[in-house]
Amino acid sequence: MSSKRSVGVLLFDDFEVLDVFGPLEMYGMSPEAFDIFLVAEEAGVVASRQGPKSVVDHKTADGHQYDILFVPGGTGTRREVSNTRLLDWIATQSQQAELVTSVCTGSALLAKAGVLDGVQATTNKMAYEWVTAQGQKVNWVKQARWVEDGKFFTSSGVSAGMDMSLAIISRLLGEAEAEKTAQWAEYEWHRDAGHDPFAAVHGLI
Amino acid sequence: MSSKRSVGVLLFDDFEVLDVFGPLEMYGMSPEAFDIFLVAEEAGVVASRQGPKSVVDHKTADGHQYDILFVPGGTGTRREVSNTRLLDWIATQSQQAELVTSVCTGSALLAKAGVLDGVQATTNKMAYEWVTAQGQKVNWVKQARWVEDGKFFTSSGVSAGMDMSLAIISRLLGEAEAEKTAQWAEYEWHRDAGHDPFAAVHGLI
């Protein structure tokens, strides 16, 4: 049995490229620790909002259980919040996953699937009103780069996913590994989960 | 005729995901200004160093000329510096392109293709020695987040490509558009091209 953790990245049409590949850059610096799988409802390819297409590794119906469930955002979330089959898959995965994570408006899908009820969470600051309306029982946090609450990690918009994934690596593999990852990526990691200038930029506070 | 600029992103096996998708996130915020194409020698799919695969839009042999040539880095560059057919394509594209850009070790391919001779350029700070050996006539800059020299933009490692692409958007579309792009991506843009703490982290200065 592999000692690696599997990262299941949910893709849907019009996903946001940096939501996905920012965190995957960070996980990908520790190939001995993480196996990355792109997961979608259908086999084949999925087109990002920006145009470039990614190849699906697993279908949701394949029945894999992921250690880390990773739900990105993008304009496609506006459609997928009405996809009850996909929301059911998210809910089922979330029960067994060691960590449940989202970037940007990906938290709308977690919220609509009901897995964030009673959980502290955050999301994209420009889409805040729409996302938070998807989960009335979620304890939404207006100003945060990311929020950790037990096994749930939710980040603010797009680039915040990189800071959050470094925090995840820090929890799972230690702070030295996260620090090394950031240095290899020449990334100035924002370690303070509460550092969120964009809540003010986008008029939330 | 389209008034959009075409961005031709050169892919090869073992490209680095954030090198590619960090900048594409930024260009993708202005779909009215940029058309993005993933370009490779063969049709089909190309696997990143991290595992996820991308779908090729154009083959290099298709004969398209791109307004912005974009060469990412990744461990695959170690192989491609010996690929004379690919280096010839880079040299030919560079002659007509409005801008020639690289992220991370992508500058090794530009250097080996000869297009950076007499040009100021930078690269990844961990791979500095290897990259700079690919172009003895390049005016390499040890400490820089990115370097602009005429139509050439070269960035430091991985995440530096995001700062550089915002500088490119600023030059092409104005600083307000670059600022808006960064805010939408909730990205704290490093506007100072000389800001490079990683030159010291990786022992170059």
Image: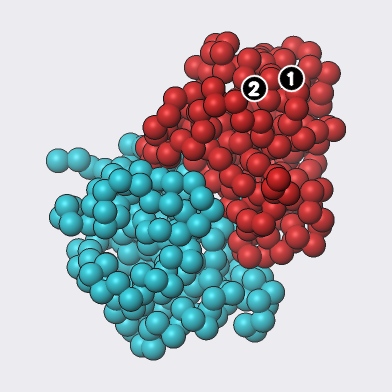
Chain colours: A red, B cyan
Q: Dot 1, crowdedness within 10 Å: few (<14), some or many (≥20)?
A: many
Do discs 2 and 1 share a chain? Answer: yes
Q: Residue A191: which disc?
A: none
Q: Is residue B203 above or below residue B37?
A: below
Q: Dot 2, crowdedness within 10 Å: few (<14), some or many (≥20)?
A: many
x and y percentages locating residue B153 in the rendered image: 40, 66
Amino acid type for the residue under numbered disc 1: Val
Q: Residue at x 85, y 33 (%)?
A: A150
Q: Which residue is drawn at 81% across and 48% down?
A: A171
Q: Badge 2 sits on which subunit?
A: A
Q: Residue at x 74, y 57 (%)?
A: A178
Q: In which quarter of the image is residue A179?
A: bottom right
Amino acid type for the residue under numbered disc 2: Ile
Which residue is more in the foreground, B112 or A157?
A: B112
Q: Which residue is drawn at 14% across and 41% down?
A: B1
Q: In this view, does B133 lie to the left or right of A103?
A: left
- Farthest residue to the front: give it: A1
Q: Is residue A2 left or right of residue B41?
A: right
Q: Residue A90: which disc?
A: 2
x and y percentages locating residue B170 in the rendered image: 43, 53
Q: How many labels does the image show?
A: 2
- Residue under pointer 1: A115
Q: Badge 1 sits on which subunit?
A: A
